[in-house]
Structure formats: structure tokens, C-alpha cells
Image (cartoon, rainbow, N blue to C red):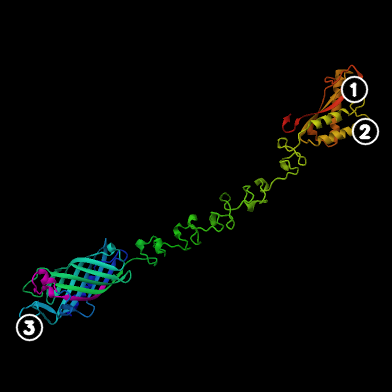
Amino acid sequence: MKHLNKLLVAVLMAMGLNAHAQDSNNPWAISFGVNAVDTRTSSGSGSGFFDQHFSQPFAVKDNWNILPSLSYIGVNRYVGSGFSVGLQGSVNKIDKLVTFAPGSAGQDARGNVVTNPGDLMYYGIDATIKYSFQELIKSKVIDPSLSVGGGYTFFGDNSFGTVNPGAGVTFWFTDAIGLELATRYKWAVAANEDKPLDRSVFQHTAGLVFKFGGKDTDGDGIYDKDDACPDVAGLKQFNGCPDTDGDGIVDASDACPDVFGLAALNGCPDTDGDGIADKDDACPDVAGLAALKGCPDTDGDGIADKDDKCPTVAGPKENGGCPFLDADKDGVADKDDDCPTVAGPASNRGCPEVTSEALEDLKVQARAVYFNSGKATFKTGDKETQARLDAIKEILKNYPNAKFSIEGHTDSTGSAKINQKLSEDRAKAVLDALVQRGVNPENLESKGFGASQPVASNKTAAGKAQNRRTEIRHIGSKYQGKL
């Protein structure tokens, strides 16, 4: 029971010490297994120091003491840069005690004698600093190491301190489970010759090691310290962050995390392949233009087809994308065309320019309008005068935006005052007759010049006849001023 208590104390110390480890992911490790104690190294036989202490290291059958049960336990903690520290408690029963006794019965060639001392128990409590070469050799399976440390040994009723250089190798079956093989030379400090059990030994261990202590909050197999998204399960290739839609873009950087998309569009899809993400595309099923939020413009008039009343024919926005009607095909839309049924240049608002032929015709027709003598009334019963007025009306209606001046003239007979009044009245009579026939009054004005502008001599009857006349002259446009 006394020995059992010693082991229990050693185990509790080992389990309670925050020491030794295997890596930064799982900073803690616990190991347990069997140990072997070899007392040959302190027998004193041999020709020199190394021969005396380190010869016959693998004489297992002759020299090793092995307790066939769980006989050591250790706890370890990783401290960084390949180093770990730990504490180990071990127990053994010595039934092979090697001593140097030349001439004794049963001695070997070196003079060593192996005896069974009876109920001799061995206990050890050892602290260790270990350096792992696993990262240096870049292996995930083989983990060689060197260690140094110290401890305290209970050998029967004796106890003494030790200095423990050692070496080992661990074979990792998984990231957290491995087979650990190790050996330590436990050199007895200040060994007492009067106490033959105060001796150095080799202790070999073989057992399982389990790493633990790494925190993985989201359970994705990536430890929180390496997990860029520790609270949500993710993928190793994304440092623990999720990619819900599997498009290779982590959700945190994915503008459309639930829909498979393109990296060029921050993870959003582009169904119609027009380079505009569906979420920003007003027409996601048909390729279009960025300027129109992804919608097409078939006729190229700057109006999306979906908003264009005439999607295949270019037209202005103010007309719903449809071209304005141009009945006379003169390039001036009917809405802007003062002569929508008669072709004319845009400079004249779609109306034809007044031709010299039309002006000559007006001159002929106006001079054939006759009045009663000395009056401003048309000659009674003169059908030709009415026909001339109708003809003038037909000419003028072709020029709805042209402005004309109707001018009355007399010969020199009579006073100037009377002639002036008569010429004005006759011009006004022609204007009124044309307005009655449907000519726009805004296109007409009347003037009288009396006898001031003769075209022939007033000294002859023929000349006077020519001077008594009505003329119609083109004076410009209603919109553009005088020509």
C-alpha cells in the first residue's frame, strides 16, 4: 500500500501539472504505457566509462525489468517553437538487479551477476523538456525528439535525484493519437557507495499518446486559433470559413452566398452572360447593356426594349421609343411640320419654299381681279374675278407658313388722298375674299400705295390701265421673319 500511494502521488502530480505537449493545435497530451528499467549501467563492469555504462543496451532478457501492466503515465504541454514540457510518473518491480561480482557463481564474461532482490519496487517522478524535430523534417507521421530533465527516484527504501538526458520517437496514427517510444539515461546525482541501490539506470518506455485541448467551437475540424470563422463551420481550404453555394468564394466575401456565382461578380450569378450580376440586372434572362441595367436595346435608341414601344425601330424617348410620323417623308416629323402633307425643308419647318413660278402665277392672277369703277367692290357678275381669287387661294394653301402682302395700286386720276384710300380698300377687299375662302389671315396683310408706284405711264389710257392693279408679294415666314 505504501508503494501504491507513492505511485498515486506521482500520477496526481503528473495529471495536475500544466506541462508538456505535442503541437499548438492540441496543446495538451497524455501518455501511458509500460516501462523497462535496466540497472546494468551502474554495475561497474567494463574497461572504460562508456563500456561500463553503455554496453549491452539491448540485453532485454537478461537485464530489463518490465512490469506487465500499465506502469507509467505522463501529461505534457506544448510551449512553442517545437518545445514542450511535461511530467511523468512511473512504477516498476526490480527482479533483475545487475551487480559486478567477479568470481561469484553465475557471473557473465564481464563479471556481472544478475540477482532477484525480491520485493524491490521502483518509482520515478520526472520532469522533462523536449524538443521535437517533426516540423523540421516536415513529417506528419514520424516525430523524433531529444529531451533533458530531472527527477526523483524511489528505489526500495532509498531515494535520490537524477538528471535525465533522453531521446524518443513518436509515430502518429492520426493528428491526435500516436505510439511513443522513448529512452532516458537517469544519472543518479551524488550516488552513495554505501547505498548500492543509489544507482543510475536506463528507463525505456512504450505507450500511447493522446493529444487534446484544441478548441474547435464550430466543430469543423479546424481549431479556433487557425479558424478565420470560428463560430460557423467551414472548409479547410478557406481557413475554416464556409462557402454555402460552393462557388469557391467564402460567404463573407460572397455578395450572393446562397447562389453559385462567378468570382468576377463577387460570387453572384450572371444567367444571361452579359457581365452584369443577376441581382443588379433588370433583365437577368436576356443579355443587355450595363448602361440600361442589363437590358437590351435592339434598335439602339437608348431605350431598353422592355420600355420601348417600338423596340425594333429607333425613336426618341419622349415618343416612347417610336419614331415620330412624317407623312410627307420630308425628314420633318409631323408634329414639327407646318406642312405635314407637303414635303419641305426643315429650315422652313417642313413647308415648301415659295418658288418664283408661284410668285409669277400670283402676279398674273392678282392683276386679273377687277373692281367696279372708283370703288373697292369686285365687278358685279365678273366670274373671271371669282375664278382668279379661287386660283390665288389654291396657290397660297401650299405655303401655310409663308406670309404675303396684298398691295393695291391706282392710276394718277383723282386726288392722291382718294387714290390712297381706294388702293387700301381694294387690297383689303382681296384679303377678305381670300380669308373667306379659307386662307389663314395670319399669313396675309394688305397695303395701299395709291398712284405712288406706277408700272407704266399715266399719260396714256393703256398705261393707266396697267397702273390700276392688285399685286401679291411674298414677304417672308411667320416664324423666320422677312425673307
Q: Earlier in the sequence, mark 3 or mark 2?
A: 3
Q: Is residue 363 visible?
A: yes
Q: Position of residue 23 (x, y in %)?
A: 29, 65
Q: Which residue is mark 2?
A: 383
Q: Is residue 9 visible?
A: no
Q: Pick the residue in front: 392 or 56.
A: 56
* Element class at badge 3: loop
Q: Position of residue 449 (x, y in %)?
A: 83, 22
Q: Amino acid at mark 2?
A: Lys
Residue at 89% across, 20% down: 464
Q: Pick the residue in front: 67 or 346.
A: 346
Mark sitting on residue 465: 1
Q: Earlier in the sequence, mark 2 or mark 1?
A: 2
- Look at the picture and state if 244 lies above or below 154: above
The answer for how far apart the CA atoms under marks 2 and 1 are is 20 Å
Q: Which residues are magenta?
A: 31-55
* Residues at marks 3 and 2 touching, judged by CB atoms closer than 8 Å: no
Q: Earlier in the sequence, mark 3 or mark 1?
A: 3
* Element class at badge 2: helix
Mark sitting on residue 105: 3
Near mark 2 (Cα within 10 A), the count class, few <14, some 14-19 or many ≥20, is: few
Q: Position of residue 1 (x, y in %)?
A: 18, 80
Q: Pick the residue in front: 167 or 245.
A: 167
Q: Amino acid at mark 1?
A: Ala
